[in-house]
Image (spheres, helix red, strand yellow):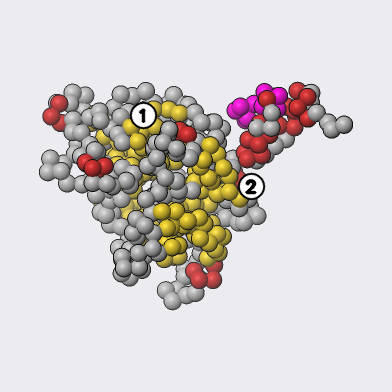
Amino acid sequence: MEPDWSNLPKDILETVSKKITSISDYLRFRAVCIPWRSASSPSPRHLPPHLPWLMLPYNHHLNQGNDADSSRFFYDFSTSRIRRIDLPETCGKQFCGSSQGWLALESGPEISLLNPITRVQMQLPSLEMPPDIWGVSDVESEERMPLDIWPSRLHRGLTDPIIQRFILTSKPTDPDCVVMALFKTNWGLAFCQIGDESWTIFEAPAPDGTGNGLIDATYHNGLFYCFSFDEVKVYNLNNSTCEVMKIIIPLEQADYHLIEGEVEELLLVAQHRAPHGLSKRDQFSIYKLVIEEDGPDWIETRGIGERMCFICEGIEQCFTFPIENFQMQVLGENLLCYASPLIVEKIREDYWGWHPEDNFGYDIKMVKLPTVEVPYFSNYWRDHVIELVKNLGSYPTVYSRGLWITPSFF
């Protein structure tokens, strides 16, 4: 006679569930049967922080109900396995960022948050609602400029996300959480809180409709930072102040990301480009924002300390966290892991660049950043870059791009 595993005592099931340390294993435990699910907490507090998963591309053009497949696949970095999660909430939507374990999803002018583990959703202000302007209490109606790209961008057939950078200052269940977004539009940097009716932009759009020139933005030590080619702006929501620092970016042929360093450091990660500027190289430089007597400057530094950095090209995502939080001492400190989209099947050889009929996949690589100066013609990068995964998946170029997300039940 086979044992009836579904009728195990509840206290034993509770004890077993609290011994599980993997989010994937915990989800599988709760999926066994109703008694096992009821005996385990839907919001476990004992699970340690988890290394990021790479959410793989999917066809975001298919709406729910149109035979759309709601299966979403994640590459688990810690186990090198693919995880499948059913997320019908993503049908007809594309992700534009992740933060604190939550996805930011776009569907036309509607922006929402989704926790892919718990499937809890939260709605953000619609982009159809003209924004407020930070620090201006009485905004004239003609100054409340609507978004200058939506919906014309959809009429032109463009499907890239309208949000370039997305950050939560804390879990969205926290009433003090602030949502920050860097838009690829005349809005520039904007913020809101859960329940707001509209976004608030930091600066009024230029009357001539020119762009804001912002490259990246981040939240660090209670402040919002954004930077362009020649300046860094620091916004403090608590006292409604803005500090402007004139600084020229250190390199021209590079892609840049603002990240949090150790203690109170603000770092700039520069991923070098090839001389023609069209392709990225497996080479990085790290700069630290330093305030000197003659003014602020980006000073090249050696690595990122006892932290690990994740980059996802294509959606220009970058973030760091301390390695001690993730029991990653076995790999060591000062690590950078990056996922790069590349064409794995060229359908149209007569077409230069990416064609809608081509297929793309991902390479995932990791490098230990140098702690000493590397000579220009050194083989350091060639010898220290480790290829973790090659040609992960094969997706039509009309699919969404991949995205790192740190899974969490909160």
Q: Depth-wise, is mark 1 or mark 2 nearer the camera?
A: 1
Residue 38 belongs to magenta span: yes
Residue 124's disc number = 1
Could you tell me how far apart the alpha carbons at marks 1 and 2 are, in whole angstroms?
Answer: 34 Å
Question: Measured along the vertical axis of the image, is residue 275 above or below residue 298?
Answer: below
Q: Secondary structure at mark 2?
A: loop
Residue at left offset 56%, top offset 42%: 84
Residue 247 placement: quadrant: bottom left
Residue 61 horizontal/vertical position (percent): 37, 42
Q: Earlier in the sequence, mark 1 or mark 2?
A: 1
Residue 364 belongs to magenta span: no
Residue at left offset 44%, top offset 76%: 377
Find the residue positioned furthest to the front: 67
What's the magenta region? Answer: 35-45
Q: Residues within 10 Å of mark 1 (few under 14, many from 20)?
A: many
Q: Which residue is mark 2?
A: 327
